[in-house]
Amino acid sequence: MSLRCSKCGTAVNYFAPYGTIVWWECGCGQSWKKGDEKKPPIGIMPRKFWDEQRIQDLAAAMGRYIAANRPVPSEWVEEYNELTKRLA
């Protein structure tokens, strides 16, 4: 099994009992030990999913306004149309 450093590309020394790598180190200073992994911080919702949720929210709000026999704000209709075109 050949393992190369992600920083410099040189072959690294590693320890792999039972075929599972538990640590490795390279002469350039890079090293890794099992359990040292850190999860990345939580990011943001992808825009596609946000847009889909926004479309549902706009449709529901427009439905409530129609049911209450009130005029639907034109901004809502414009935004709804823009979002559906973007996702099509």
Image: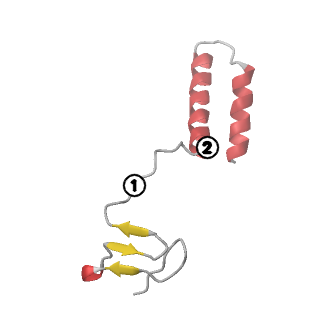
User: Cα distance, mark 1 to mark 2?
Assistant: 26 Å
Q: Earlier in the sequence, mark 1 or mark 2?
A: 1
Identified by mark 2, the residue type is Arg
- The residue at 54%/78% (across/down) is 9
Residue shown at 47% from the left, 83% from the top? 11
Q: Amino acid at mark 1?
A: Lys
Q: Which residue is mark 2?
A: 47
Q: Quadrant of residue 48?
A: top right
> Looking at the image, is 12 positioned above or below residue 48?
below
Residue 1 in picture, x, y percent from top left: 39, 87
Disc 1 vs disc 2: which is toward the camera? 1
Within 10 Å of disc 1 (Cα), the crowding (few <14, some 14-19, many 20+) is: few
Taking 32 as reference, is 72 left or right? right
Number of numbered discs on residues: 2
Q: Position of residue 33 (x, y in %)?
A: 34, 67
Instruction: Give percent across and percent down for residue 13.
Output: 38, 81
Vertical comparison of 80 with 24: above or below: above
Q: Which residue is mark 1?
A: 38
Residue 75 spot, x, y in % from top left:
73, 23
What is the quadrant of residue 36 in the picture? bottom left
